[in-house]
Amino acid sequence: MASAATPCSTGCSIERTVNPADDPVPLSALQHWVYCPRQCALIHLEQAFDDNIHTARGNAVHKLVDTPGYEFRSGVKVERSLPLWSDRLGLIGKADLVEFHPDGAVYPVEFKHGRMRQKTHDDIQLAAQAMCLEDMLGRPVPLGAIYHASSHRRREVAITPALRELVVQTADAIRAMLSAGTLPPPVFDARCRECSLKDICQSEALTATTTQRALRAHLFDPED
Ligand code: SF4
């Protein structure tokens, strides 16, 4: 049974109706889906996981912030590994760091390995964290940052209406995939080279089979 539409507590324009019987979507799934829907399904539907150099580096970076607790830095309260959720959006997860500033500003910071580069799959996870914080605290969270561990630099991200809409649409797509229980097809492009699941996914073999099937279908077509 669907719940009544619940408005955003900070007055944003996004209203949601999420079936309370559905399991909440993990925040990490949004990042996985935007990177590759098949990767998201392998992890969150099939519970498949494997490490490669990129996930090992990511794990090392998250060791810095995966112990819950808080400290004060120059008057700013910094919470580590803070649990987050939104019943309105059907989301659950945690934030690496959240800064609570003396002027009331709330500022999530997501840790990533690698150099400073804009990546939509990083930004959507941060935006979802900001939206959960808004629902939990009842105040706007218009900004956050990705901390790029290799360059020790922060990249500030505005939580724009477009990014908020992408969070909602992506969560809907993941819910539909989980409920259908089907794996999306492989993307078989540059993303696969860095993907820790390429052996499990078999993207190359599956794509080759599809290509061979298409070639076979036209093998005996008459020439013009
Ligand atoms: S190997 Fe490619 S298609 Fe398969 S999950 Fe990874 S990125 Fe997606």
Image: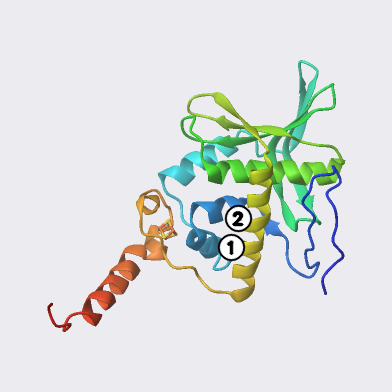
Lower sequence index among marks 2 and 1? 2
Query: Residue 142: percent from the left, percent from the top?
Result: 73, 34
Query: Residue 23: percent from the left, percent from the top?
Result: 73, 65
Q: Amino acid at mark 2?
A: Ala
Q: Which residue is mark 2?
A: 29
* 126 up-or-down from 202: above or below: above
In the current view of this chain or complex, which residue is farthest to the left?
223
Residue at image location 78% in from the left, 68% down from the top: 19
**Mark 2 vs 1: CB contact within 8 A:** yes
Gap in angstroms between the C-alphas marked 2 and 1: 7 Å
Query: Residue 216: percent from the left, percent from the top?
Result: 22, 80
Residue at image location 76% in from the left, 15% down from the top: 74
Q: Quadrant of the N terminus?
A: bottom right
Q: Secondary structure at mark 2?
A: helix
Q: Is residue 83 visible?
A: no
Q: Residues within 10 Å of mark 1 (few under 14, many from 20)?
A: many
Q: Which residue is mark 1?
A: 44
Q: Residues within 10 Å of mark 2 (few under 14, many from 20)?
A: many
Q: Which label belongs to residue 221?
A: none
The quarter of the displayed image where residue 75 is located:
top right
Q: Nearer the viewer, residue 98 or 33?
A: 33
Q: Secondary structure at mark 1?
A: helix
Q: Answer with the quadrant where ligand 1 appears in the image.
A: bottom left
Q: Nearer the viewer, residue 120 or 106?
A: 120
Task: Tell me if 169 is positioned left or right of 224 in this view.
Answer: right
The quarter of the displayed image where residue 131 is located:
top right
Ligand 1 has an atom within 8 Å of the beta carbon of the residue at disc 2: no
In the current view of this chain or complex, which residue is farthest to the front?
224
Q: Quadrant of the C terminus?
A: bottom left
Q: Amino acid at mark 1?
A: His
> Looking at the image, what colour scheme do you see?
rainbow
Residue at image location 78% in from the left, 42% down from the top: 133
